[in-house]
Image (spheres, grey):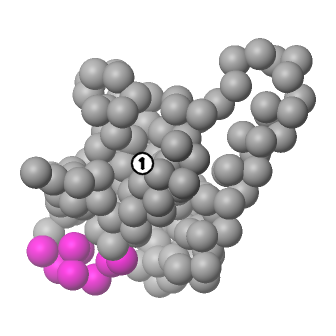
Amino acid sequence: MENHSQRAARLFREGYNCAQSVFVAYCDRTGLDEQTALRLSASFGGGMGRLREVCGAMSGALMVLGMLRAPLDPNDRTAKASHYERVQEFARRFHERHGTYIFRELLGDQAGSGHVPDARTEAYYQSRPCERLVADAAEILDQMLAEDA
Protein backbone atom coordinates (compact mmCIF):
# COMPACT_ATOMS: atom_id res chain seq x y z
CA MET A 1 0.00 0.00 0.00
CA GLU A 2 1.24 3.50 -0.87
CA ASN A 3 2.05 5.95 1.87
CA HIS A 4 1.31 9.68 1.45
CA SER A 5 4.82 10.47 0.27
CA GLN A 6 4.74 7.77 -2.41
CA ARG A 7 1.25 8.76 -3.51
CA ALA A 8 2.22 12.44 -3.80
CA ALA A 9 5.24 11.52 -5.94
CA ARG A 10 3.10 9.26 -8.16
CA LEU A 11 0.46 11.97 -8.63
CA PHE A 12 3.16 14.43 -9.64
CA ARG A 13 4.49 11.93 -12.18
CA GLU A 14 0.95 11.59 -13.55
CA GLY A 15 1.03 15.31 -14.39
CA TYR A 16 -0.61 17.03 -11.43
CA ASN A 17 1.10 20.12 -10.07
CA CYS A 18 3.00 20.03 -6.78
CA ALA A 19 0.18 21.44 -4.65
CA GLN A 20 -2.37 19.07 -6.16
CA SER A 21 -0.04 16.11 -5.70
CA VAL A 22 0.39 16.71 -1.98
CA PHE A 23 -3.18 17.82 -1.24
CA VAL A 24 -4.84 14.96 -3.13
CA ALA A 25 -2.51 12.42 -1.51
CA TYR A 26 -4.30 13.20 1.76
CA CYS A 27 -7.90 12.77 0.61
CA ASP A 28 -7.96 9.67 2.81
CA ARG A 29 -7.38 11.95 5.83
CA THR A 30 -9.27 15.10 4.82
CA GLY A 31 -12.39 13.33 3.58
CA LEU A 32 -12.45 15.42 0.41
CA ASP A 33 -13.22 13.75 -2.89
CA GLU A 34 -10.33 13.91 -5.33
CA GLN A 35 -12.10 16.16 -7.84
CA THR A 36 -12.75 18.81 -5.18
CA ALA A 37 -9.21 18.52 -3.83
CA LEU A 38 -7.78 18.87 -7.35
CA ARG A 39 -9.76 22.02 -7.98
CA LEU A 40 -9.01 23.60 -4.59
CA SER A 41 -5.28 23.13 -5.01
CA ALA A 42 -4.94 23.78 -8.76
CA SER A 43 -4.01 27.46 -8.41
CA PHE A 44 -1.02 26.83 -6.16
CA GLY A 45 1.25 24.99 -8.63
CA GLY A 46 4.36 26.69 -9.96
CA GLY A 47 4.72 28.77 -6.83
CA MET A 48 1.11 30.05 -7.04
CA GLY A 49 -0.01 30.01 -10.66
CA ARG A 50 3.58 30.04 -11.96
CA LEU A 51 4.37 33.25 -10.10
CA ARG A 52 7.43 31.47 -8.68
CA GLU A 53 6.58 32.27 -5.07
CA VAL A 54 5.88 29.67 -2.31
CA CYS A 55 6.54 26.12 -3.51
CA GLY A 56 3.33 24.30 -4.40
CA ALA A 57 4.38 21.24 -2.38
CA MET A 58 4.45 23.40 0.73
CA SER A 59 1.15 25.08 -0.18
CA GLY A 60 -0.52 21.69 -0.63
CA ALA A 61 0.81 20.46 2.70
CA LEU A 62 -0.39 23.59 4.49
CA MET A 63 -3.83 23.12 2.95
CA VAL A 64 -3.90 19.62 4.46
CA LEU A 65 -2.74 20.99 7.80
CA GLY A 66 -5.57 23.52 7.66
CA MET A 67 -8.14 20.87 6.83
CA LEU A 68 -7.01 18.65 9.70
CA ARG A 69 -5.94 21.07 12.41
CA ALA A 70 -7.21 24.61 11.80
CA PRO A 71 -9.51 26.09 14.44
CA LEU A 72 -13.06 26.98 13.46
CA ASP A 73 -13.72 29.67 16.08
CA PRO A 74 -12.51 33.00 14.64
CA ASN A 75 -12.21 34.42 18.15
CA ASP A 76 -10.05 31.67 19.62
CA ARG A 77 -6.70 33.43 19.52
CA THR A 78 -4.96 30.63 21.38
CA ALA A 79 -6.08 28.05 18.81
CA LYS A 80 -5.09 30.36 15.96
CA ALA A 81 -1.67 30.87 17.51
CA SER A 82 -1.26 27.12 17.91
CA HIS A 83 -2.18 26.55 14.28
CA TYR A 84 0.20 29.23 13.04
CA GLU A 85 2.92 27.66 15.16
CA ARG A 86 2.34 24.36 13.30
CA VAL A 87 2.48 26.18 9.96
CA GLN A 88 5.77 27.82 10.92
CA GLU A 89 7.15 24.49 12.15
CA PHE A 90 6.31 22.89 8.81
CA ALA A 91 8.02 25.78 7.01
CA ARG A 92 11.07 25.45 9.26
CA ARG A 93 11.42 21.72 8.53
CA PHE A 94 10.91 22.14 4.79
CA HIS A 95 13.43 25.00 4.75
CA GLU A 96 15.89 22.93 6.77
CA ARG A 97 15.80 20.17 4.13
CA HIS A 98 15.83 22.34 1.03
CA GLY A 99 17.31 25.71 2.02
CA THR A 100 14.16 27.60 1.01
CA TYR A 101 10.49 27.18 0.25
CA ILE A 102 10.44 29.77 -2.53
CA PHE A 103 9.85 28.13 -5.90
CA ARG A 104 12.25 30.24 -7.96
CA GLU A 105 15.04 29.60 -5.44
CA LEU A 106 14.37 25.85 -5.41
CA LEU A 107 14.44 25.59 -9.19
CA GLY A 108 16.93 28.32 -10.08
CA ASP A 109 17.36 28.62 -13.84
CA GLN A 110 14.80 25.86 -14.39
CA ALA A 111 12.01 27.98 -12.92
CA GLY A 112 11.09 29.37 -16.33
CA SER A 113 8.61 32.19 -16.74
CA GLY A 114 5.17 32.92 -18.06
CA HIS A 115 1.87 31.22 -17.49
CA VAL A 116 2.25 28.19 -19.77
CA PRO A 117 3.35 25.03 -17.92
CA ASP A 118 6.41 23.21 -19.20
CA ALA A 119 5.87 19.95 -21.06
CA ARG A 120 6.16 16.92 -18.80
CA THR A 121 8.88 14.95 -20.52
CA GLU A 122 11.35 12.52 -19.00
CA ALA A 123 13.97 15.29 -19.24
CA TYR A 124 11.63 17.54 -17.23
CA TYR A 125 11.33 14.94 -14.46
CA GLN A 126 15.07 14.26 -14.45
CA SER A 127 16.11 17.90 -14.24
CA ARG A 128 13.76 19.18 -11.54
CA PRO A 129 13.59 18.48 -7.81
CA CYS A 130 9.78 18.68 -7.75
CA GLU A 131 9.06 14.97 -7.35
CA ARG A 132 11.39 14.87 -4.34
CA LEU A 133 9.85 18.08 -2.96
CA VAL A 134 6.31 16.69 -2.99
CA ALA A 135 7.49 13.45 -1.40
CA ASP A 136 9.42 15.34 1.27
CA ALA A 137 6.47 17.67 2.00
CA ALA A 138 4.23 14.65 2.60
CA GLU A 139 6.89 12.97 4.74
CA ILE A 140 7.27 16.08 6.92
CA LEU A 141 3.51 16.42 7.20
CA ASP A 142 3.09 12.79 8.23
CA GLN A 143 5.76 13.24 10.90
CA MET A 144 4.05 16.34 12.26
CA LEU A 145 0.60 14.75 12.25
CA ALA A 146 1.98 11.74 14.12
CA GLU A 147 3.61 14.02 16.69
CA ASP A 148 0.32 15.90 17.08
CA ALA A 149 -1.83 12.80 17.59
115 relative to 34 in the view: left or right? right
Provide residue 30's location: percent of width, then percent of height: 40, 29
The x, y position of residue 76, in whole percent, is 85, 22
Using the image as rendered, state which of residue 59 and residue 128 is in the foreground: 59
Question: Residue 47, percent across and down?
Answer: 53, 56
Q: Is residue 7 left or right of residue 107?
A: left
Going 69% across and 18% down the picture, which residue do you hit? Answer: 72
- Depth check: 128 or 133 in front? 133
* Identity, as a three-letter code, of the amino acid under mark 1: Ala
Secondary element type, mark 1: helix
- Residue 28 visible, this angle: yes
* Residue located at (34% from left, 40% from top): 26
78 vs 101: above or below: above
* Quarter-of-image position of residue 91: bottom right
| Relative horizontal placement of residue 92, taking residue 58 as reference (left or right) | right
Q: Position of residue 45 (x, y in %)?
A: 43, 50
Identify the magenta region.
Answer: 122-129
**Residue position for label 1:** 19
Q: Tell me: residue 119, above or below residue 123.
A: above
Residue in the image at 83% along x and 40% along y: 81
Q: Residue at x 88, y 18 (%)?
A: 75
* Quarter of the image where one finds residue 95: bottom right
* Depth check, front residue: 38 or 67: 67
Q: Is residue 119 magenta?
A: no
